[in-house]
Every structure is written in structure tokens, then in C-alpha cells.
Amino acid sequence: MADAEAKVDISRVLNNTFGVIGRNPVVFLGLSFLIVGLPNALFQTAQGTWTTGSAGFNFSANYSAQGLEFILLMLLSVLLQATLIVATINDLAGKQFSFSDCLSKALHKLLPLIGLGILFSIGISIGFVLLVVPGVILYLMWIVSAPAMMSEDLGVIDSMKRSAELTSGSKRMIFVLMLVYVVLAFVLGLFIAFFGSISTIFLAVATIAVSTITGALQGAGIASIYVDLRTAKEGTDTSSLAEVFS
């Protein structure tokens, strides 16, 4: 039943997030590896992170390099979200889909997704400069922009407006979900640190694996948030949502 004041359901989102990945590990982890895990490995190789024995995304003390890295990773994150919304909606609707289906549909909107990623990055960067909190608020407000673009065939600005509309009233709940993700990422970060203490080879493998897993969790999680908001606020079922990807 539709309810414009309805909020995102944390337990349902988590259940859908882990459920879709568990039922389709090859697609979700494969896409995450291709779009996030592999590029991250290339970033770290280019900057010599593994040879210095450090892990993480801050590969340079140079601010311009860090800024470029942030934008690139944000663009890749938006692209991953675009692929995984296709997979998530089809899975929840009980429809068949493939790795290539998800990737091709996202690439079909590559230019708008790049534009979205750039505006998203600039807006959040400015927000974080303004004492962090505005950046967090903007992130929570625009978090489902990519799924909105993909499933509702919207432009860049309209996708961000649509995300703000859908997340209205649910930002606190979404923030809790993001904290869950951060805790999971922290635990996996400890995993990297352990293997990094063994050798640089183990560090490299562990870093790629963790980047892939966290990318899949984040992408599937954001897609699940979008589906949950559409269902709760507008009464839209997943079968109807999946028709756009037929």
C-alpha cells in the first residue's frame, strides 16, 4: 500500500541486499570486480601502494591526485550502482538476467551517468568542505540518484531531484544503513591489514577481494534502498519496476 510518508525499512533492505548477492554471486561480485576491484588494483599498482606496504584508497599525499582519485572512484561507484540496480530489480521480480545484460544497460546511459557522477562528486566535496555535515546530508539525499536514472529514464538533474524526493523522511534510517556498511568495511579492512602483514602478494589479493566485496554490498544496498522506497512510498511492485529493463 502506498504511503508518501513511509520510511525505508532497514531489516528489509539488509535482507534484500544479502539475498540478491547470495542468489547471484557471479553477477554481483563479477561486476564489482570489473568496475571497482580491478580499477582499484590498477590505482594502487600505479602509485606503488603495495610496494610501500600500505593499503586503502589514499594513494598520494598530493591533493590534486587525491581529488582526481575521489572523482574517478565516485564515477565508478555510480556506474556500479547502475549495473546492480538492473540485477537487483530483476532478481527481486523473479526474472532472469545476465552479467552482460546489466553491463550493457548501464553503458547505454554512460554519458548521463558520468554527468551524474561529476555533479555528485562536486556537490558532496563542497559539502564536506563546509564542516562535513552538509556533505553527509547531500550524500544521503542523492544516494539513489543512479537507480532513479536507470529505472525511471531520467536526466541528471531530475535523477538527483527524484532521489531527494524519495529519501525525504528516511535520511536517518539510510544513515544507519550506511553505518552498517562502514562497520562491515572496517572489519574487512582488518582482514586486509592481517594479510598485508604476511606479504605484499597477500596484501594485493586481499585488497582486490575486499574492494570487490564492499563494492557489491554498497551497490546492492543502494539498489535495495531504492526498491524499498519505491515500494513503501508509492506501492510500486518489483515486477513493474523490472519492465523497464525488458
Image (cartoon, rainbow, N blue to C red):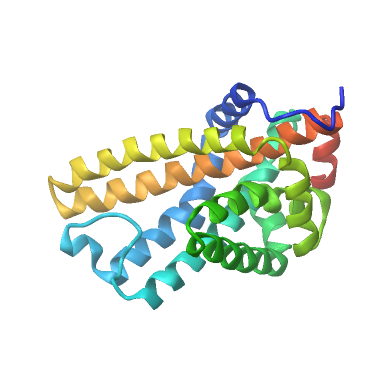
Q: Where, quadrant-wise, is the N terminus in this rendering? A: top right
**Which x, y percent locates residue 188?**
33, 38
Q: Residue furthest front?
A: 131
**Residue that appears at 70% across and 52% down:** 145
When asked about the image quadrant of residue 89, the answer is top right
**Which x, y percent locates residue 63?**
36, 74
Image position of 38 (left or right of 110): left
Residue 101 visible in the current orientation: no
**Residue that appears at 44% across and 71% down:** 67
**Which x, y percent locates residue 205?**
28, 49
**Residue that appears at 17% across and 64% down:** 51
Q: Nearer the viewer, residue 204 or 128?
A: 128
Q: Nearer the viewer, residue 38 or 133?
A: 133
Q: Nearer the viewer, residue 239 or 100?
A: 239
In the picture shown, does residue 75 fall above or below 152?
Answer: below
In the picture shown, does residue 242 fall above or below 159?
Answer: above
